[in-house]
Amino acid sequence: MPRQDRGHGWRGWGLVVSAWLLSSSAFMLVGCAARGQSLAASGWHVQVPAASQVRRLHPLPLTVRLSDAAGQPVDGVPVRFRPLPPWTAAAEVVPDTVVTRHGQATATFRATAAGRVPVEITIANLRKVIDITVLDDTPRF
């Protein structure tokens, strides 16, 4: 599958984007990058999962964190997760829409085939695509 540059959609939207990788028991800070002005002048800060990897058929929790300019959690905001074509039949995120509670929205990713799966995360007028590498169960030497 061809890889496309998906990072351009964040320019000018003014978010502080931190990459978080959720393991089975803890969060791991992966990186941080500042971008332009605030989302719809709200001053929101969004932290999305980093590109990560998981074994085929294994669950991978995806957590998005949303806070205001003062760092306080923002509740009641819908966050939509969806695998992009051509992966819509071989991957899913359940539930596909989660409303933030205590500033967090968590859904679970799972895929039936190995490969690099682009997952779109949408919050208000913000769209971000992360890549999840799904590994086959067969060990490679």
Image (spheres, rainbow, N blue to C red):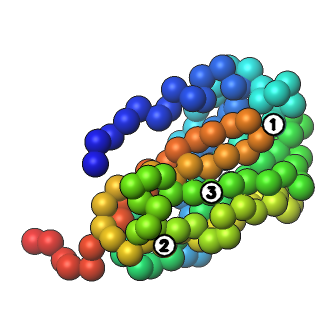
Query: Relative to 14, does residue 101 appear above or below in the rendering?
Result: below
Query: Of circles 1 and 2, which is in front?
Result: 2
Task: Specify whether 111 is left or right of 73.
Answer: left
Please name the residue shown 44% across and 79% down the image.
58
Position of the C terminus by quadrant? bottom left
Residue at the disc numbered 1: 44
In which quadrant of the rendered view does residue 126 lie?
top right
In which quadrant of the rendered view does residue 13 lie?
top right
Task: Specify whether 108 is left or right of 133.
Answer: right
Real-space Cα separation, disc 1 to disc 2, in angstroms: 29 Å
Residue at the disc numbered 3: 81
Query: Of circles 3 and 1, which is in front?
Result: 3
Circle 3 sits in a helix, a strand or a loop, which is it?
A: strand
Answer whether residue 23 is visible to the viewer in this image: no
Task: Specify whether 67 is left or right of 36.
Answer: right
Callout 3 amino acid: Phe
Callout 2 amino acid: Arg
Sequence-first tag of 3 and 2? 3
Residue at the disc numbered 2: 110
Callout 1 amino acid: Trp
Query: Relative to 137, does residue 42 appear above or below in the rendering?
Result: above
Circle 1 sits in a helix, a strand or a loop, which is it?
A: loop
Q: State the residue lying farthest toward the left.
A: 141
Real-space Cα separation, disc 3 to disc 1, in angstroms: 19 Å
